[in-house]
Image (tube, rainbow, N blue to C red):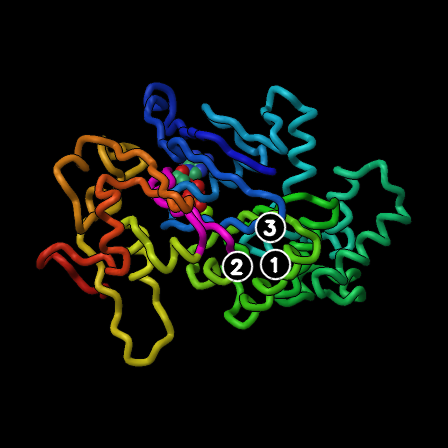
Amino acid sequence: MLQALDIEVGFPLGQGWSRRTVLRALRGVSVTVAQGETVGIVGESGCGKSTLARVLLGLIEPDSGQVLLEGRSVSHRHPAALRQLRRSVQMVFQDPRGSLDPRLTIRESIAEPLRCLRPEVSAREHRTLIGRTLEQVGLDRELASRYPHELSGGQCQRAGIARALVAGPACLVCDEPVSALDLSIQGQIVNLLADLRREIGVGVLFISHNLSVVRHLCDRVLVMHLGQVVEEGSAAAVLSTPRHPYTKLLLSSELLAEPGRPLPVLPDGEPASPLSPPTGCSFVGRCPVVMETCHHEPPLMNQDTVGHSLRCHRWPDSTNSTHSPAMPRNTAARRPK
Ligand SMILES: Nc1ncnc2c1ncn2[C@@H]1O[C@H](COP(=O)(O)OP(=O)(O)O)[C@@H](O)[C@H]1O
Ligand SMILES: [Mg+2]
């Protein structure tokens, strides 16, 4: 339903002459969200997750590659297609309070996308739609006349989801939608998204660095590193039998609330800079199983028979060590302070 194919995005930095420096935020990223499917995107901060979200929403025109909505190409050169994309794909933001206008009541905030995207619908129908959507996200209709500062963080996020849903999108792009919420509220919002997917069949692109939430919610997962997808497959396959050393590192760095569990041991080395990505594999500086080839040759994405893909020169040998966590390189390993 929503597809990004081979997307490249670079941000020119500096001014005048120095604008020649380009930060390569996305390097050949492809992702597909089918109807009713929830696709998770995970990866460390700065790997390009939000940039990909902005490309899929039509807010950034990629330098190359294509965004397709139901098979039709969308670009800034075709305003009609872009309008259709804006109507079909809606965003849920990380900061629930910051994403609502403080001067508008919840009802007015939710009505805004209806006014812009569904002008053909009458004011009476607007009221019915808003009431129905509030119910769908579990908000009391009475809260509609309140302002964002009168609501809790969880209620604001429900209002944010209602605003994203009200114009009847086919797909929601959720960029870290629970990261700013209390733990108990996080669970409620995750369950709400799962219910919505089941009830109205909306597709969801779920960006998060919380692997437990992704495991719970997503059908498929893409792992991003330095502007590239390095591993992709079913959530069960990627998160329980990770193959890429970077995915193993992400999973072994997860802090779990288990008394007595030691802090994760992290490998030495700095993340590479998107200003000058390595010539070979982007994970070469921190990879515990690095080989000579990894320094010179960029690995290609390879897929196995059940759709688990991997960008690693160790493939297919890496499948032999699927359960082993990312091991630190020799004595350079250190514990976080
Ligand atoms: N408008 C921008 N101008 C310049 N650089 C940007 C801009 N937006 C994002 N970046 C850079 O692009 C990279 C990817 O950013 P982003 O997509 O926000 O990462 P993530 O959401 O995974 O943390 C980062 O290095 C970030 O600094
Ligand atoms: Mg982000």
Residue position for label 3: 92
Dot in front, 1 or 3 = 1
| Horizontal side, residue 42 vs residue 286: left or right | right
Q: What residue type is disc 3 on? A: Val
Earlier in the chain: of badge 1 and badge 2, it is 1
**In the image shown, does 316 or 36 lie closer to the viewer?**
316
State the residue lying farthest toward the front: 305
Q: Earlier in the sequence, mark 3 or mark 2?
A: 3
Q: Are marks 1 and 2 in contact (CB under 8 Å)?
A: yes
- Give the number of the disc on residue 217: 2
Q: Position of residue 85 (x, y in %)?
A: 65, 34
Q: Magenta span covers which residues? A: 218-235
**In front: label 1 or label 2:** 2
Q: Quadrant of residue 248?
A: bottom left
User: In percent of the image, x 69 and y 66: which residue is there?
Assistant: 150
Question: Which labelled disc corresponds to residue 193?
Answer: 1
Q: CA distance from mark 3 to mark 2?
A: 16 Å
**Upstream in sequence: badge 1 or badge 3:** 3
Label 3 sits on a secondary structure element that is: strand
Q: Establish if 216 lies above or below 58.
A: below
Side of 80 relative to 65 (left or right): right
- Any magenta on residue 313? no
Q: In the picture provided, is 219 more to the left or to the right than 240?
A: right
Name the kind of residue labelled 1 in the image. Answer: Leu
Label 1's element? helix
